[in-house]
Image (tube, rainbow, N blue to C red):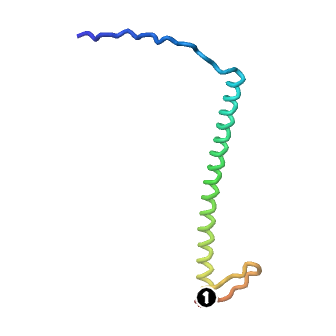
Amino acid sequence: MTKKRTKKQDVPVIGQRFITSDELLKIKVAIEQVNNIQMQVGGIEAQKSDLISSMKEKVMELNKLKSELESNYGDVVVDLSNGEIKDNVPNTKD
């Protein structure tokens, strides 16, 4: 069984029009600038992700240190200016 082949009909191009070379250049420059900005934003997002991961690690380290201090000294408040510790008094004002 043979398949029938149909001839492609050429579509006539009527009145081709072009923008000026100056307009084409402006469009290309604008697209390139947008692409560069998108790449920079992507780089910033990658840095943001790295910083968030680092912050999470530091918060975990801080929580571990707080736990160790609580084991050693009980429920206390540390004055960060001089290292003095005081008993943590819950706020009972309602």
Q: Quadrant of residue 9?
A: top left
- Determine whether, in the image, residue 9 is placed left or right of residue 45: left
Where does the C terminus fall, quadrant-wise? bottom right
Residue for point 65% across, 51% down: 47
Q: Residue at x 63, y 62 (%)?
A: 55
- Where in the figure is residue 71, as x and y percent of width and height? 58, 82
Q: Nearer the viewer, residue 17 or 72?
A: 17
> For mark 1, what is the residue?
91
Percent position (x, y) of residue 50?
62, 54
Q: Nearer the viewer, residue 10 or 35?
A: 10
Q: Is residue 13 above or below residue 36?
A: above
Query: At numbered mark 1, what does the secondary structure look like: helix, strand or loop?
Result: loop
Residue visible at 73% across and 78% down?
80
Query: Badge 1 local density, few (<14 within 10 Å), some, or many (20+)?
Result: few
Which residue occupies 64% across, 85% down? 76
- What amino acid is labelled 1 in the image? Asn
Residue 74, percent from left and from top:
60, 86
| Residue 11 place in picture, x, y as percent | 47, 12
Tally of marks? 1
Q: Residue furthest right?
A: 82
Q: Is residue 7 above or below residue 23?
A: above
